[in-house]
Image (cartoon, grey):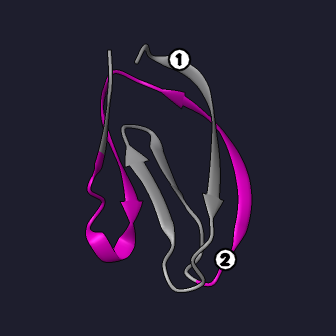
Amino acid sequence: MKAGLVKIVVRDRSARRGFHFVGKGAKRATGARFTGSQTWRLRLAKGVYRFGSDVRRLPGRLSVS
């Protein structure tokens, strides 16, 4: 993925786990009890971003060049 401004739509359907997205200059999350959708506008820089449930130690990876 190219660096720059992106829109991320999160649809969190679990009332027990939150969703996290972390990396260089970005740290966003939904609460553990939150259910629903959120739209985040983020500026991604070159590097690796991690995402996923806080219970599973953020298994997802996104590489930005």
First reached walking from the N terminus: tag 1 or tag 2 = 1
Locate the C terminus and report the quarter of the image it occupies. top left
* Residue sitting at x 45%, y 16%: 3
Image coords of residue 59 (percent x, y): 26, 56
Looking at numbered disc 2 in the image, what kind of residue is underneath it? Phe
The answer to which of 14 and 46 lies nearer the viewer is 14
Name the quadrant containing residue 47. top left
Residue carrying label 1: 4
Image coords of residue 13 (percent x, y): 62, 71
Image coords of residue 45 (percent x, y): 41, 24
Q: Which residues are magenta?
A: 33-60
The answer to which of 25 and 44 lies nearer the viewer is 44
- Distance of label 1 from label 2 (alpha carbons): 28 Å
Is residue 33 left or right of 36 when viewed as pictured? left
Q: Nearer the viewer, mark 1 or mark 2?
A: 2
Looking at numbered disc 1 in the image, what kind of residue is underneath it? Gly
